Image (cartoon, rainbow, N blue to C red):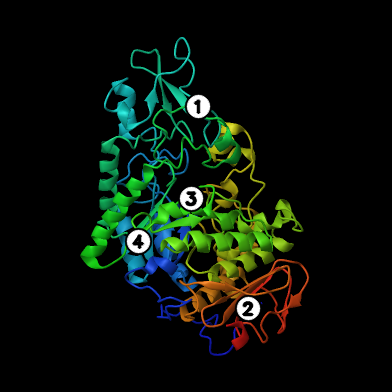
Amino acid sequence: MLIATAGNGSSADSAPSPSLPGPATGAATRNTAQRWWRDAVIYQVYVRSFLDSTGDGIGDLAGVRTGLPYLKKLGVDGIWLSPFYPSPQHDHGYDVADYREVDPVYGDLAEFDRLVADAHRLGLKVLLDIVPNHCSSEHPWFRAALADGPDSAARSLFHFADGRGEHGELPPNNWRAMFGGPAWSRVTESEGGAGQWYLHMFTPEQPDLNWRNPAVRADFDSVLRFWLDRGVDGFRIDVAAGLFKHPELPDSPDPAADERTRDSVNPLAWNQPEVHQVWREWRALCEEYTAHDGRDRLLVGEVSVRTPSEQAAYVRPDELHQAFFFHLLTARWDVDTFRKVISEALTDIAGTGSTVTWVLNNHDQVRTVTRYAAEPGGAGLAESAGGLGPARARAAALLMLALPGAAYIYQGEELGLPEVVDLPDEVLTDPIYHRTGSREKIRDGCRVPLPWSGHASPFGFTSGTDAARPWLPQPEWFADHATDRALADTRSFWHLYREGLALRRSLPQLGEGTLRWLESPPQVLAFVRGDGLVCAVNFGTEPVAAPVPGVPLLASGDCPAGTLPGSTAAWWMGTPESR
């Protein structure tokens, strides 16, 4: 149940308040034209699954534009668009064939320009997903590399190498690809014989670019300018710890680490020191635009590294503005684990002068409701719509919105969507499944098109008498999570997010700043923001005494005065003793 005291400006029927200034200690100044990104809440739009305007069963840019008022009403500060560039879709757009165009399935440049204009009229920022580590095997550069042969300038844009063995029949090293199988593929040369090998840390259709070649750097400089000139507010950078490989491409002592973890673990292929100079150059480019019109452009990186201190190196004042803090996403539902990762983030990341960028989910992860259901005491994957999964996901959302810094919300999280875990094999599209034959850690289940209205598929995702079925099938139970129902039910996930976002805008204690931990019972995490705003989360299943007397401003579940139930988070305006 969502509880709001009178006069807090967060009625479920009122629009979110505009950004307001706040004190500089513990609730730093709300950011407008400049430094807006430091405490922004950005909504991730997976374009293919957001809203279909053409009836072909695939979401598109016009659908995103139609949905902008919905996102404005929710109360976010901007959107991050998944790749919509021309692509053969071997990895749904993360295999880019042309970085300066729109794939016809998603629209065209004119539609993109209308989307940016409409978003800006609503006060929403627009971030694009840029993919610099690799491109598509159908990119003109790679086609030329295949045609031109060994030792050509075209091949120097990628990692081509002769094979080992008597006839070059073995890969140049023992690395394995993150999505399964060897990280090298052998090409057939123009004369028809077996030739060199090329590196691909994901799939053979995604050859890794060679960032030691100045032509690669120069072209991406041009790509960034192309989109900045069209008015975008920044970029989410895919595989930001990648780009450079060890110059000698030696064997790895644990070649299967990336394949085993589905993460960038191989120290010879990721997190090389040269990558930091690229981010310095990109930061300087963004600041060139900011100096021209006073409007900050953001670089936020997908930086998958082992520790917060390693991540901190990417958000130094002259590099990326921010990087997703995945350690909160991967933290198990445990009070000590959450406190540890939050403390490390505030020490290491905020210590650089950046702000922490919190995330609970994205298009590559099992949905939050289902992930928490699989934790000890939960109902398990198949029953994730019930049990403790939803309660924990609601509490985690309220916790995230109370933390200092910025936050990203993956589409559908505001609806409490569980993972679709029983998609038939024949509809799966994830290259992980097709390369490994395993459903473990595949990503289709979190990418099923959103339900907007109605009681049967396509649930308003696509319309028209001749409309195609959604590109991934929606289960019948999606009806319980449709947007129209969520908006009508004041106890829904949607209203929890909206109330939290409205309070985050109106209360100067929230947003950028610091926190102070409070003493609390063993299963409770409690902290103070700014001038006495208290957030507490009960990680246990039994109720405990509330750390602050009185009725909470906002709670993730039924929260009687004086009590904090299990698997519940709440915000209070604290007493003088808690300040």
| Residue 59 shows in the view | no
Residue 310's tag is 3
Residue at 40% in and 47% down? 105
Residue mark closest to the camera, 4 vs 1: 1
Question: Which amino acid type is marked by label 3?
Answer: Glu
| Residue 307 shows in the view | yes
Q: Tell me the residue that label 2 is attached to.
A: 2
Return the disc, 2 or 4, that comes first in the chain's sequence. Answer: 2
Furthest residue toward left: 292
The kind of secondary structure element at disc 1 is loop
Q: Is residue 133 left or right of residue 304?
A: left
Residue at 30% in and 21% down? 151
Q: Tell me the residue that label 1 is attached to.
A: 251
The kind of secondary structure element at disc 3 is helix
Q: Is the residue 517 above or below the residue 324 in the image?
A: below
Question: Which amino acid type is marked by label 1?
Answer: Asp
Q: Tell me the residue that label 4 is attached to.
A: 115
Residue at 47% in and 59% down? 349
Return the disc, 3 or 1, that comes first in the chain's sequence. Answer: 1
Which quadrant, please, contains the C terminus? bottom right
Question: Residue 522, position in %: x, y?
Answer: 73, 68
Badge 3 crowding class, 10 Å Cα cut-off, few under 14, some 14 to 19, many 20 or more, is some
Q: Is the residue 84 above or below the residue 188 in the image?
A: below
Badge 2 crowding class, 10 Å Cα cut-off, few under 14, some 14 to 19, many 20 or more, is many
Residue 208's tag is none
Q: Are marks 3 and 2 in contact (CB under 8 Å)?
A: no
Residue mark closest to the camera, 3 vs 2: 3
Question: Residue 212, position in %: x, y?
Answer: 32, 35
Question: Which amino acid type is marked by label 2?
Answer: Leu
Q: Is residue 211 left or right of residue 28?
A: left
Badge 1 crowding class, 10 Å Cα cut-off, few under 14, some 14 to 19, many 20 or more, is few
